[in-house]
Image (cartoon, rainbow, N blue to C red):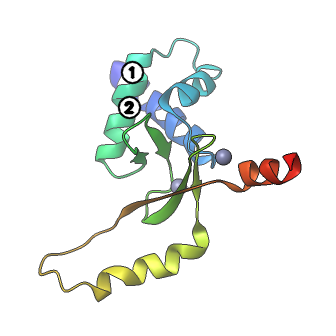
């Protein structure tokens, strides 16, 4: 039954993403999931990523460049490294982030945020220091 096969692929994609914290691109995720499901097509991959984003199970991160994916779907802050281009979580900012909407006088309702800071990640920062 095609319906069953489809959701099995979606589960494998979600599971793969949940077991990593490196915010992979669709292509990185695709190559990894294909080790498990060799006949997975890139089109199916993108379709499933869209479904998972729409249902709020995963986040899509983009600063206008390549899109990255994240299985941590609640509001959290990211650092985008301007050297290696990767996204990193900034978990010590989560409390401040949750408090932030309460300080807004906006008359609507705020559900969450997708905040991206820019800077240099710890790995790249270490390499700079070693090269001096
Ligand atoms: Zn970096
Ligand atoms: Zn994240």
Whether residue 67 sits left or right of residue 128 in the image: it is: left
Asked whether 94 or 31 is in front, the reply is 94
Asked whether 52 or 121 is in front, the reply is 121
Q: Secondary structure at mark 1?
A: helix
Q: Give the vertical position of 57 relative to 96 (above or below).
A: above
Horizontal and vertical percent position of residue 22: 62, 45
Q: Are marks 1 and 2 in contact (CB under 8 Å)?
A: yes
The residue under the point 52% across, 11% down is: 39
The residue under the point 24% across, 73% down is: 110
The residue under the point 86% across, 46% down is: 131
Say how many tags the image has. Answer: 2
Residue 1 seen from this side: no
Q: Quadrant of the N terminus?
A: top left
Residue, disc 2? 48
Horizontal and vertical percent position of residue 85: 57, 41
Most distant residue in the top direction: 39
Q: Secondary structure at mark 2?
A: helix
């Amino acid at each position: 039954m095609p319906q069953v096969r489809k959701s099995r692929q979606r589960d494998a994609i979600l599971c793969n993403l949940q077991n990593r914290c490196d915010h992979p691109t669709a292509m990185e995720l695709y190559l990894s999931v294909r080790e498990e499901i060799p006949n997975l097509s890139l089109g199916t991959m993108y379709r499933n990523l869209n479904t998972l984003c729409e249902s709020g199970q995963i986040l899509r991160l983009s600063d206008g460049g390549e899109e990255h994916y994240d299985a941590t779907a609640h509001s959290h802050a990211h650092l985008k490294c301007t050297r290696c281009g990767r996204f990193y979580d900034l978990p010590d900012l989560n409390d401040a982030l949750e408090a932030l909407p309460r300080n807004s006088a906006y008359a609507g309702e705020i559900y969450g945020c997708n905040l991206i800071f820019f800077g240099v990640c710890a790995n790249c920062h270490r390499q700079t220091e070693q090269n001096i």
